[in-house]
Image: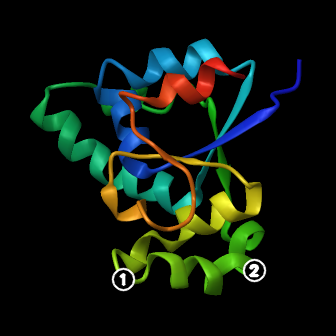
Amino acid sequence: MTPQRRLVLDANILLRSVFGTNVLPVLKHYEEHVAFYSPAICFEDAEHILPKVAKRQNLDPSLAFAIRIVACVEVIAYAEFEVSARARISARDPEDWPIVATALLLNAPIWTEDRDFFGSGIATWTTDRIEIYLRNS
C-alpha cells in the first residue's frame, strides 16, 4: 500500500525517535500509511548532536539511525521554495527554512516541538497531538 499522507519531521523529532520513548513507536506504527520526510539538514543536525546526547545518556550512537523510516529530502528538491519559506519563518528562526520549504514542496504538515513554526501558514503538530493527524491516514 502506498502512503497517502505525508509528514515533515523537524530535527528535534528525529532525535526523539532515537532517545525518546514516544516517537519511534508512532513512526513504526504508521510507516505503511504515512510517508515521513525530513530535509537533509535535519539529519545533519541530528547526527551532529547524536554523539553528545548518546555519551550523556551512556547509549550506543551507532544504533541511532539503523531504522530509516524517514526519507531524507535533499536541498535540490526544495530549493525553489527557499524565498517563500524564508518569508514565512524569518521572524522566528531563519535557519529553519529548509523544514518549511520541504513542507511547501510536499504540501505536508510539520511534526515538531519547536514553536517557531507556528504562524508560518503550515499545519504544525506536536508529539502529544500527532496521532490525531495520523489516525486518519
Q: Tell me the residue at 52%/77% (across/down).
A: 88
Q: Is residue 119 above or below residue 28?
A: below
Q: Tell me the residue at 14%/26% (across/down).
A: 58
Residue 11 as seen in the image, left or right of residue 100: left
Q: Is residue 86 above or below residue 50?
A: below
Residue 137 as seen in the image, left or right of residue 101: right
Numbered disc 2: secondary structure: helix
Identified by mark 2, the residue type is: Glu
Which mark lies nearer to you, 2 or 1? Answer: 1
Residue 31 as seen in the image, left or right of residue 48: right
Picture coordinates of residue 67, whole percent (x, y) = 56, 25
Identified by mark 1, the residue type is: Ala
Quarter of the figure with residue 68: top right
Numbered disc 1: secondary structure: loop
Q: Tell me the residue at 10%/36% (across/down).
A: 56
Q: Which residue is mark 2?
A: 80
Picture coordinates of residue 9, whole percent (x, y) = 52, 45
Circle 2 residues within 10 Å: few <14, some 14–19, many ≥20: few
Picture coordinates of residue 123, whole percent (x, y) = 55, 51
Sequence order check, earlier mark of 2 and 1:
2
Picture coordinates of residue 112, whole percent (x, y) = 41, 46
**Which is nearer the eye, 71 or 115?**
115
Q: Which residue is mark 1?
A: 91
Q: Is residue 35 above or below residue 71?
A: above
Are the two marked residues, 2 and 1, in contact with CB atoms closer than 8 angstroms?
A: no
Q: Tell me the residue at 42%/25% (across/down).
A: 23
Q: Residue furthest left?
A: 56
Quarter of the figure with residue 27: top right
Circle 1 residues within 10 Å: few <14, some 14–19, many ≥20: few
Image quarter (top left, top right, bottom left or bottom right) of the C terminus: top right
Residue 64 as seen in the image, left or right of residue 136: left
